[in-house]
Image: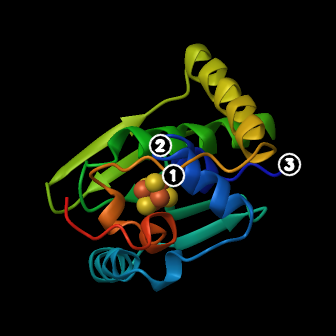
Amino acid sequence: MKITGVKINYYHICHTKLWLFSHNIALEHEHENVNIGKLLHEERYSKKKKDITIDNTISIDFVKQRNGVMELHEIKKTKKMEDAHLRQMLYYLYYLKKRGVEGKGVMNYPLLNQIREVELTPDGEKSIEEDIRGIEEIVTGRMPHPKRMRICPKCAYFEFCFCGEGNED
Ligand code: SF4
């Protein structure tokens, strides 16, 4: 099974979302949050080498070399999903390390004027391996029953999960 950064991210957000996405039920492109992020990305970082995709597995906003170290940069609007975003970055570092490339991650929060560096530690590697096993278990099983959360009304799968239940939250 191909493990992508998006799957790692969804694993830490919602297992139903992970399952739907992994079974090619992809609705994300229809949601306006994606377009806002893209816009932000294009306006603030137009001069960097960007939108790097590696092996159709890693999709990174831009890459820089600093003092001989490869820096993978992600741009985020808020820290609302910070944990999932950090795990996704850790997975990128893990994936590259397995292929002989050491790097470091940098999360950019331009609207908050903050950055956060991410390094892959031995514990981080182990936790990513646990994530991979967890993802395989979920994706090969039955669809996890949707559990309503605060983020659901903003999720592209909302109508799929809660059709007929209303939109109040
Ligand atoms: S609507 Fe909620 S339960 Fe359904 S996939 Fe999205 S986050 Fe998960």
Mark 2, secondary structure of its residue: strand
Q: Position of residue 9 (x, y in %)?
A: 52, 48
Q: CA distance from mark 2 to mark 3?
A: 25 Å
Disc 3 Cβ-to-ligand 1 distance below 8 Å: no
What amino acid is labelled 3 in the image?
A: Met
Between 21 and 35, the residue placed more toward the observer is 21
Which x, y percent locates residue 77? 26, 62
Q: Which is nearer the N-term, disc 2 or disc 3?
A: 3
Q: Earlier in the sequence, mark 2 or mark 1?
A: 1
- For badge 2, the amino acid type reads Gly
Model colouring? rainbow
Closer to us: mark 2 or mark 3?
A: 3
Q: Which residue is mark 2?
A: 105
Q: Residues within 10 Å of mark 1 (few under 14, many from 20)?
A: many
Q: Could you tell me if the residues under marks 3 and 1 are in contact, i.e. CB atoms within 8 Å?
A: no
**Label 2 – label 1 distance at C-alpha:** 5 Å
Q: Which residue is mark 1?
A: 72
3D distance between C-alphas at marks 3 and 1: 24 Å
In this rendering, the answer to whether 153 lies above or below 43 is: above
Instruction: Give the number of the mark in front: 3 or 1.
Output: 3
Q: Which residue is mark 3?
A: 1
